[in-house]
Amino acid sequence: MAIIYNENSREFHLHNGKISYLIQIMRNGQLGHLYFGKGLKERDSFGHFQQYAYRDMAPCAFADDYTFSLEHLMQEYPAYASADSRYAAYDLEEENGCHVNKFVYKNHKIYGGKPELSGLPHTYIEKEEEAETLEILLEDEMVGAQIILTYTIYADLPVIARNARFICTGEQPVTLHQAMSLSLDLPDKDYVMLDLAGSWGRERHIHERPLDVGVQSIHSMRGHSSHQFNPFVALRRPHTTEHCGEVIGASFIYSGDFLAQVEVDNFDVTRLTMGIHPSGFDWKLKKGEAFQTPEAVLVYSEEGLNGMSQTFHTLFRTRLARGVWRDKERPILINNWEATYLDFNEEKILNLAKDAKELGIELLVLDDGWFGVRNDVKSSLGDWYPNLEKLPSGIKGLSEKVTDMGLKFGLWIEPEMVSPNSDLYRAHPDWILANVKKENSLGRFQYVLDLSKKEVVDYVYGLLEKILKESKISYIKWDMNRSLSESYSNGKPAEEQGKVRHQHVLGIYDLYERLTSNFPEILFESCASGGGRFDPGMLYYSPQGWISDDTDAVERLKIQYGTSMVYPISSMGSHVSAVPNHQVFRKTSLETRGNVAYFGTFGYELDLNALSEEEKSEIKEQIKFMKEYRSLIQKGTFYRLASPFEGNITAWMVVNEAKTEAILGYYRVLQPVNTGFVSIKLQGLDEEKLYRIEEENFAGYGDEWMQRGFSVSDQASGVMGRYAKTQGDYFSKVYHIVAE
Ligand code: DGJ
């Protein structure tokens, strides 16, 4: 791995054998972009990658060169109000209202390692030799401002992590109206844009569209990354598949408003930009002040979408997620939400715990409803002290009782919110993130607390610290159940209001940082009404998240398949729930519900006391299976094999590092009649090794399983025969594959 600066060509080459990223200092001193993709050999200059042409009407920088126009040059971090009329990476305004500026190369630094981003989630390294970093300082002396563009390349991963920092150096303040984390120009438009779209209950479905001239984008203006779009896009070549072909993935390590936009100009040049959504964002900087953008990560793969996902999985599982739980096997849990909703008392919870213990479950999670006077969702958020009518021995007593039974105890919180009917709201009505003098929307009967104010973060922290200190709590489920709407920070001056939504996110990060660092043994799981804030920012604080409130096994196939585009299996909360399912009322077998939920952090979310003896013994077997294979499932290399978005069959598998063991999940939604044979081509095996698929008691070499495939032709026309027991809808099977 190396970052090279070529003095003669004035070019930077970031490369690690797998990828190259090329930047040039252009004739006008600004930065041009030359290339991002498969690794290239170093040479004297790559300047020929920049194409010049005379174009009618194009504003040009030099009187002697009518081919040098920002209108069509590929740039590294383009400015608004320049000769480039495409969408910019940033927009900076001087006090006199002028948006025109020209940040030119001043100097650069290249060093081993990767710097921290204070107060913001970011990817990291454990040893300096894992990465190298380039910082390029740009300056506009007339404006009195600097930009530092930072690029880190990992030695063993096809990853570039980027961010930008704006500094006001002059006497006059400047205001940022837009500051994206990355801008990437690509020389053609021969791509399909893939994003993860959906809504509550059907999060992160794969969505694709071919690029075309104009703008295509996804965004959130909800104050959280949202159920609707995830802060991720991929640009794949039209013929790229799950297993081969080029793809560039971009992921934004942030949990608030975002914009990911792909613009194709009229010369078919593609510009990808990603960062904090500029709407509602204004950040005034006085002399000496700086604005730091969040980090964005670029991944390149020539091994298809799976190749891209595996890079994200490795990066996010091992160099974004942190803490003692990062590499530990995750506990199998029972959550009481779908078992009791808010209608519980200590006795019910202890009964659940008793059955859970007998079945082999390791952690009991007490969900919403344990605090204030919360008997319905209309009250008490903010009053983080126990409801002694429901729980006479409080959280302290209950957590001790559960722990004495041999289970760990976990607790639900929703610390960013306040109910109008709460002691907190009555004491501090101006702590809501809305203008108290106006009519403001309630969402799920609650307001958002203004975490852009330190005193509010301090207050919430104080209450939570008390419970965590006095009780035996091993796990926290951190929920948030409404989007931001009419945000306004009471008491702050006008010029500070454009900062509030980002400062609110920083406040959430601050609260998370304080809780996770002061209680490092606690496992945090993020949640936002299901998967409304399942993003890389959250993964930095909580190594797992609840990916959806939809627990139906069939719906989960799409949600888990889509989520796996970016996020590791170890980050996906997945539970077995009751039938008929509470979201879609579908009945699936306990086996299929388990077979889907295995591919995540496993748990149950149903009334264990209502189960038959037969169901209990099946659950015991499931728990035994998960305990045996969770390390492989949560840390192995994950391959998507057949997509639920394309047909009746879903299949995926995980393979251990040594390629000696794998688990295959196969799911068939509807039972077909008398159709052709189906086989699934396995992935990730060693061609030379002989593997036995245990349930089939048949061995084949890795190349056979991968080239010819594994036959899952279970759709026989009659009830007789080899697969008779597999007849019916919502069938699934999990196979254990071992090398001999
Ligand atoms: C939404 C979450 O996604 C659910 O799992 C549950 O915790 C409820 N909130 C509780 O209000």
Image: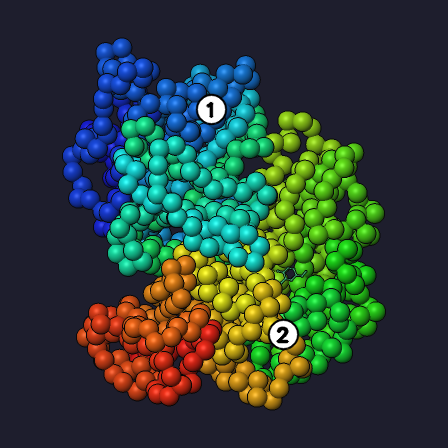
Q: Secondary structure at mark 2?
A: loop
Q: Give residue 194's position: percent from left, percent from top.
A: 39, 48
In the figure, residue 636 lies in which quadrant?
bottom left
Q: Is residue 270 above or below residue 600?
A: above
> Mark 2 = which residue?
606
Residue at image position (54%, 16%) is 97
- Report the amino acid beneath label 1: Ala
**Image marks 2 and 1: residues in contact by CB distance under 8 Å:** no
- Report the amino acid beneath label 2: Leu
Q: Is residue 52 visible?
A: yes
Q: Give residue 393's position: percent from left, percent from top.
A: 79, 73
> Mark 1 = which residue?
145
Residue at image position (49%, 79%) is 591
Q: Give residue 596's position: percent from left, percent from top.
A: 47, 71
**Nearest the eye: 79 or 169:** 79
Q: Give residue 14's position: percent from left, percent from top.
A: 28, 42
Q: Along the horizontal axis of the image, is 28 left or right of 369? A: left
Q: CA separation, marks 2 and 1?
A: 57 Å
In the figure, residue 119 lies in which quadrant?
top right
Instruction: For label 1, count other residues whose C-alpha is less than 10 Å away and answer few (under 14), some (14-19) or many (20+).
Output: many
Q: Is residue 171 visible?
A: no
Work out which quarter of the rendered image holds the C terminus and state it: bottom left
